[in-house]
Image (cartoon, rainbow, N blue to C red):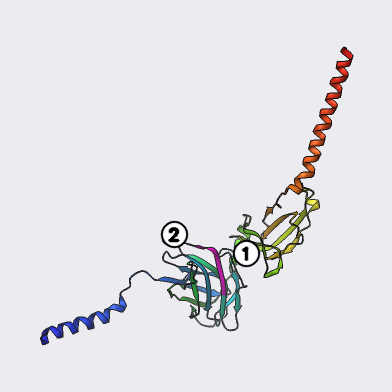
């Protein structure tokens, strides 16, 4: 190979090596804030969404850590009521002294967003602090954040992290709007109860029956849950409010009646007072049905016997 060919090959190799990092073989997923840029005044409140654009990948869990500029913002509450996540193994944590929020959630069975759709992981309610001059700061995701693919192997999703920029104008907002209060006043929809499952596991509650439940409310958010257990007589249950004994409950809930002979009702109540009730009926066995079958057969036999006696009396009169 002559010197000219060698030189041309070297130039080609170096050029490829330089430009290769700028080429991608597919779109990269993005973890981002919505809105990505916002301008507010002192004492104003706003809600920032934490989203991930998976670029078509299916996910089932996420562990997110984020930092925000605590010198201009105060994180008041983490909101999960509109999240696409339905499972929260731990309560989200806000460390306002260092400007840090962490949360872990999941979606049993996974979630596959449609084209152009992002997954809402959660929301954070912020309040703007006091400042004597216009000041800006950024919220960003910590490197330990992980998004898990729904592949049964907990494979982490390859993604890029986007920052959000917040700017505070040194003016006190007149009659600042409370976004949560607005949602509360506009909420007229009842919560949606889902994931209602009765289970028994040797490692939980000593192998006793327990109930797993969850609910979603896109308006004001879930306030609390209540559960009622009504014992059944045979296969009949008195469906009357006066027999209901409601008590506040959290998931997982250890059943009081371990015989599975009670009707279980779960009530979800949102912050606006709207409520939804779902019912689990106990299984019906032959032991439950047999006494009533016997009663019905005896009643039919007695009725037949009475009719038969009447017919015999009428026949004797004719004779």
Q: Residues within 10 Å of mark 1 (few under 14, many from 20)?
A: few
Identify which residue is drawn at 61% across, 76% down.
93
Residues in magenta? Answer: 103-113
- Image coordinates of residue 253 in percent, x first then y, are 70, 64
List the residue tagged with mark 2.
114
Vertical side of 67 occupied by 208: above or below: above
Element assignment for label 1: helix
Vertical side of 218 occupied by 94: above or below: below
Residue 109 covered by magenta stretch: yes
Q: What secondary structure is the stretch in magenta mostly built from?
A: strand
Quarter of the image with the N terminus is: bottom left
Give residue 94's quadrant in the image: bottom right
Give residue 23's quadrant in the image: bottom left
Q: Nearer the viewer, residue 162 or 113?
A: 113
Judge whether residue 44 can be spotted in this image.
Answer: no
List the residue tagged with mark 1.
181
Identify which residue is drawn at 15% across, 82% down.
8
């Amino acid at each position: 190979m002559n010197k000219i060919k060698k030189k041309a090959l070297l130039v080609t190799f170096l050029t490829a090596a330089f430009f290769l990092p700028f080429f991608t073989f597919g779109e990269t997923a993005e973890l981002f804030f919505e809105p990505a840029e916002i301008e507010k005044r002192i004492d104003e409140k706003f809600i920032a969404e934490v989203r991930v654009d998976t670029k078509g990948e299916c996910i089932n869990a996420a562990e997110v850590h984020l930092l925000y500029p605590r010198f201009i913002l105060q994180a008041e509450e983490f909101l999960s009521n509109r999240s696409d996540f339905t499972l929260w193994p731990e309560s989200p944590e806000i460390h306002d002294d260092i400007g840090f929020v962490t949360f872990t959630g999941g979606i049993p069975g996974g979630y596959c967003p449609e084209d152009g759709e992002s997954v809402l992981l959660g929301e954070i309610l912020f309040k703007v602090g006091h400042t004597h001059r216009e000041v800006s700061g950024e919220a960003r995701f910590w490197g330990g954040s992980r998004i898990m693919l729904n592949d049964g192997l907990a494979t982490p999703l390859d993604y890029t992290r986007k920052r959000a920029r917040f700017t505070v104008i040194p003016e006190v907002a007149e009659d600042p709007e409370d976004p949560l209060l607005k949602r509360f006043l506009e909420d007229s929809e009842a919560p949606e109860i889902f994931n209602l499952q009765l289970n028994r596991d040797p490692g939980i509650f000593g192998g006793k029956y327990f109930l797993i439940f969850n609910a979603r409310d896109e308006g004001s958010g879930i306030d609390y849950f209540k559960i009622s257990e009504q014992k059944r007589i045979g296969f009949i249950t008195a469906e009357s409010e006066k027999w209901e004994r409601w008590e506040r409950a959290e998931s997982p809930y250890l059943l009081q009646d371990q015989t599975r002979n009670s009707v279980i009702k779960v009530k979800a109540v949102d912050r606006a007072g709207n409520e939804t009730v779902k019912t689990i009926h106990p299984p019906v066995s032959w032991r439950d049905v047999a006494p009533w079958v016997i009663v019905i057969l005896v009643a039919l036999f007695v009725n037949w016997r009475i009719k038969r006696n009447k017919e015999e009396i009428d026949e004797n009169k004719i004779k």
